Amino acid sequence: MDATETPCTWWFSIEDNFLKDEDYLALKLFSITPHAAGCERVWSSLGWLYGKRRTRLGLDKIENMYKLSAYCHANAKKELPFYGIEKSTEEIHQILVDAHLNPDQRPP
């Protein structure tokens, strides 16, 4: 293999029928782009859960908090559209005010 040849081009150059499974597997593996986006997302979420205020949490508690958070984020699109169907605009506004989620109104 010379300096201009990549591992993918080398595996493409093999014409032996005996190695078809191996070259297919190698091409699949070399096609994967290495990145840490998934890990960074988990670390970001865990950093939010385990910050400067929450330094005495045990590993089990942090793990359970993250699982609950991940479940809520994963199922929010399925569950939230049904929440306000039977509520009027005024009722939804009052819920947001009570939860201090309305930017127009400050908490007491």
Image: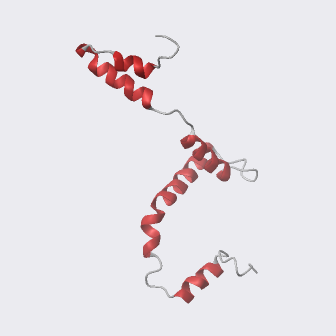
Name the foreground residue: 46 vs 6.
Answer: 6
Identified at 44% across, 68% down, the residue is 79
The percent coordinates of residue 100 (x first, y second) are 67, 76
71 horizontally vs 58: left or right: left
The percent coordinates of residue 92 (x first, y second) are 55, 83
The percent coordinates of residue 16 (x first, y second) are 26, 13
Which quadrant would the C terminus be assigned to in this image? bottom right
Work out which residue is located at the far front of the displayed protein and give it. 4
Above or below for 14 versus 30:
above
Label count reads 0
Identified at 64% across, 45% down, the residue is 58
77 horizontally vs 101: left or right: left
Above or below for 38 versus 89:
above
Q: In the rendered image, which quarter is residue 40 located in?
A: top right
Identified at 71% across, 81% down, the residue is 105
Q: How is the image coloured?
A: secondary structure
Name the foreground residue: 33 vs 94.
Answer: 33
Identified at 72% across, 50% down, the residue is 51
Q: In the rendered image, which quarter is residue 96 located in?
A: bottom right
Q: In the rendered image, which quarter is residue 18 located in?
A: top left
Work out which residue is located at the far top of the displayed protein and give it. 1
The percent coordinates of residue 95 (x first, y second) are 59, 81
Work out which residue is located at the far left of the displayed protein and give it. 17
